[in-house]
Image: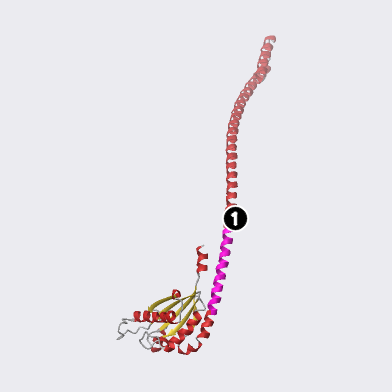
Amino acid sequence: MKKISLFLFVGLLASAFTSCVVLSPKKYKSLLATQDSLKTGWGESQLKNENLEGLIARLKKDTTGLSSALNDLKNKYSEMDSNYAKLKNKSSTEISKLSNDLKTREQRLKEVEEILRKRDEATNQLKEKLQQALLGFTKNGLTVEIRNGKVYVSLTDKLLFPSGSIIIDEKGKQALSQLADVLKQQPEINIAVEGHTDSQKITNLGQIKDNWDLSVLRSTSVVRYLTEVSKVESVRMTATGKGEFQPLDANTTAEGRSKNRRIEIVLSPKLDELYDLIKQ
């Protein structure tokens, strides 16, 4: 439109020159100035038009890129949303499973605690029964105590054996018989008989070579009496010899050595039920 106007103006200008024989210098200069101004404006307009077209092209390109990026973001969002839903469902399942496992473990723990409570209660009752049954032998060095959930009946060697002997004397047989009466009423109790000595070396005892031998032979003597004479079930019995290696006192004094020479009868409740729970 501007181009047509310019040509029209030039035409009119030429017509004016043709129709007018004489133009004043002032008008002529004014016309020339107008012509220059129009040419400059036309050039600027052309440049602006080119810049605008370039800008439009860039905007179209940017719009295409943004549209593509937007589609990518939408796809990623959909994927993340799907993954979140799966994770949420899996987490709920895992949480539910963990919760059930925890409830099961808590229930088993309560059952274990109840078994241990009953064991401790039975252990205390057994200790009281043994103390009452063996009360007459406490002056001869017999003690009954609880250690680590087990009842320990400790009998000094002077209560059971003559010096250096593995033959149980009459007072020892009486103590073991009264002990057996209680043990036969407690079939759920396991019985371990441990022989202990002091650190003095064995001399002139025939077949008994050392303290290991002495501790083992004294232990088996007690087991044989309890099973063969007092009729305690053999399947419940265990005989071991500890020699001089688990002393109660120092072996530097006669009193200390006397404490160390002993038979310990260790009574422990059967824990099959507890072991079954732990295995589960």
Crowding near the residue tagged with mark 1, few <14, some 14–19, many ≥20 C-alpha atoms within 10 Å: few
Q: Residue placed at 57% from the left, 70% from the top? A: 114
Q: Secondary structure at mark 1?
A: helix
Between residue 187 and residue 83, name the one nearer to us. 187
Q: Main secondary structure of the magenta part?
A: helix
Q: Quadrant of the N terminus?
A: top right
Is residue 118 within the magenta segment?
A: yes
Locate residue 241: give its quadrant.
Answer: bottom left
Q: Residue placed at 43% from the left, 82% from the top? A: 229
In percent of width and height, residue 119 lies at: 54, 74
Locate residue 105: give its quadrant.
Answer: bottom right
In percent of width and height, residue 53 lies at: 60, 27
Q: How many numbered discs sit on the rendered protein?
A: 1
Q: Which residues are magenta?
A: 100-125
Using the rendered image of the protein, determine whether residue 90 is visible from the camera's viewpoint.
yes
Between residue 118 and residue 62, name the one nearer to us. 118
Q: Residue placed at 46% from the left, 84% from the top? A: 177
Amino acid type for the residue under numbered disc 1: Ser
Query: How are the residues colored?
Result: secondary structure
In percent of width and height, residue 183 lies at: 49, 79
In percent of width and height, residue 117 lies at: 56, 73
Using the rendered image of the protein, determine whether residue 243 is visible from the camera's viewpoint.
no
**Residue holding disc 1:** 96
Is residue 101 within the magenta segment?
A: yes
On the rendered structure, is 60 left or right of 27?
A: left
Q: From the viewer's perspective, is residue 110 above or below residue 169?
A: above
